[in-house]
Amino acid sequence: MREEFIYLISGLILLIAAFLFAAAPADPFTQGLEELAAGNPAAAINSFRRVRTDHPLIEYVWLYRAQAYLQRNDPAQAIAVLANVNIPFEAALLRGKAHLLQGNLSLATTNAQEALRTALLREEQEVALFLLLDIAERADDHLQQVKTILQLLDIIYIRFIGYGGRVLHTHLAAAVAFLDPADNRERQALLDYGLHLVRDDPITAHRVLSDILPFLTGENMYKVLFQLAFIEMTHLRDYRSAQQRFNDLISVGPQTMVVRSRYFTAHNFLNLGQRQEAKRLFRQIITTGDRDWAPLSLYWLFRLYLGRNVIDAWELLRGAQRDFTPSAHYHRSLFRLFFHHLAAGNYTESLPVIKLLLSLPLGHHDHPRALFWRHRLGEILGDTAERYLQQLGLLYPLSYYSLIARERGYLSGPLFIPDRQPTIDALLTEASGRLKADNEAQEKLSRLILLINYRIWRPSLRYLVSLAPVLGDYLYLQLKSHLYEVKGELRLAISYATILAEMLPDPIITRSLLTRIYPRHYQSIVQQAAAQFNTEEALIFAIIRRESAFETIALSRSDAHGLMQIIPTTANDIARRLALDDFELVDLFDPQTNIIMGTSYIIRQLTRFGDLRLAIAAYHGGSGNLRRWLDALPNDDIDLFIELIPRESTRLYVKAVYQALLIYRAIYF
């Protein structure tokens, strides 16, 4: 009997323990969100129905239930559920989608426009515009399609084109074919389309703008005349036609167009071999003092002088010092003259030039460059220039120039303040303490925390934006960077961390913030590639960060694909060398394939040229171009050679990647 009692008690204890320690039933809202993401709307609807009506996010439960109904192609039920929802943007967007499914284009348009009007985030604008595009397609409204796609492309081009952008361009060209330039509204859309194409497809832009020119008057006519002349000069090389258009603009155009046309006429004279006429026009524009075109004209007149007479070039800049000192083009001219003297070995003549450049204000992006080269010149001349180096390290510790000096042992000291990476929870706790006295802000913050816990990212960001004025820049930007990272938008995560660092008064920032600006995403793949090609991870991370900011589907205007931005011809060559027989272009959007191929390519350049910065220059500008530059320019001093690279985009690229490489080394390796 006693033993039976003991067994009974033991059994009861086990039952109680099993009850107490059993896994808590899954939150039906979380379960529904997971089922919806997995493409199982029926199960999601059942889960959302089980959520209690006093749930703090009950409106979002209804919102996602409506989304599940839409996924199940049941717009009537979605509209019925949305009657309970009053969430700005999101509710209007789903109502618009539901009405579109029902074929009610009028109500779909009304709701889509409301969504666009209430959008706070760029991604909200994007999805609302895509809905408007779907409606325009259903209505066979080609004019609305063109207008909407142009708005979408403005948003998409802020980041990368991507395959979506390519598809939009194809769609845009098809819709434009239905427009009539004789119709006022359609002509305006054609004008916008033509102007949009000028940079990416100038030949098509020239055709479109030529077709509508006879129908234009006033400002639009002058605008198109100028663009046609510009395309004829720079792309078609029809210098005579361009000259005639520029002359027309100078004769009858508005004053703002007259000065601009004179400037490009001067360039056209250079194309026609009429150097004296070009000089005359550049001088004429300089005397106008025009804020935009006079400094540019000074720069080009200086270049014309520099090619023939260095003394005249120097006198031109000295004479312009009082009027043009704040101009970036004036500083650009001074640097060009300084490096011209250095390359020629005219060290004494370069000293007064660098002294002028040292007058650049603190914080100016070229000030560290001036400090570094004053020190280098001091080494050559044997004068004391240590103070410039110390200034460089103190004011600009993370600049390209400071990091080069540090690499050579000229500078030392901490690059960052050691700390621990703050979590989202820690940042939210800090925000809660700051907003303690503000009940309305506390309520928004509580909602933000709940949305983050449920990984509902777009509404989370919307609440965060609404809290920006009371959170302060530091907390707001930290949280925004964290949220975009967990959301997978790594370019924006880096961007907001960078903005925060630039706002801080101390040039030495915390390690945690620095690691957000220079992250190591895809670390295991990078480690594998570094081991395979016997190189350092820092180099691979630096190139990825500069090329794509870790966006796997990045696609540039020049058709460069993926993380390390590899163009198709280069990719096919690499695939052949690596014996990747099954390689297809779309594989460049696979992180592993892209990183292996990109690393193979940069190592090939390093083997060819034997210097990291030269390899980086070849990666960007092409090995053929680099060989030509090496043949044409002094290259014993790599620092000077980088400054002399004629292509500005490659020059800036080398500095940015090498700077990032040195920072990655400092904080991780």
Image (tube, rainbow, N blue to C red):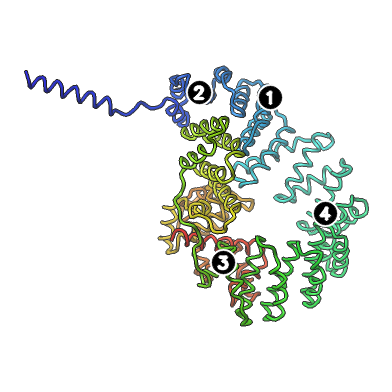
As drawn, the label of residue 229 is: 4
Residue labelled with disc 1: 110
**Is disc 2 in contact with disc 3, using a CB cutoff of under 8 Å?**
no
Q: Quadrant of the C terminus?
A: bottom left
Q: How far apart are the two marked residues, 4 and 2, measured between alpha carbons?
A: 60 Å
- Single out the residue that lies furthest toward the bottom: 382
Foreground residue among 443 and 70: 443
As drawn, the label of residue 58 is: 2
Q: Position of residue 585 (x, y in %)?
A: 53, 50
**At numbered mark 4, what does the secondary structure look like: helix, strand or loop?**
helix
Comparing labels 2 and 1, the label whose residue is closer to the camera: 2
Comparing labels 4 and 3, the label whose residue is closer to the camera: 3
Q: Quadrant of residue 640?
A: bottom right
Q: Position of residue 449 (x, y in %)?
A: 49, 34
Q: Residues within 10 Å of mark 3 (few under 14, many from 20)?
A: many
Q: Amino acid at mark 4?
A: Ala
Residue labelled with disc 3: 393
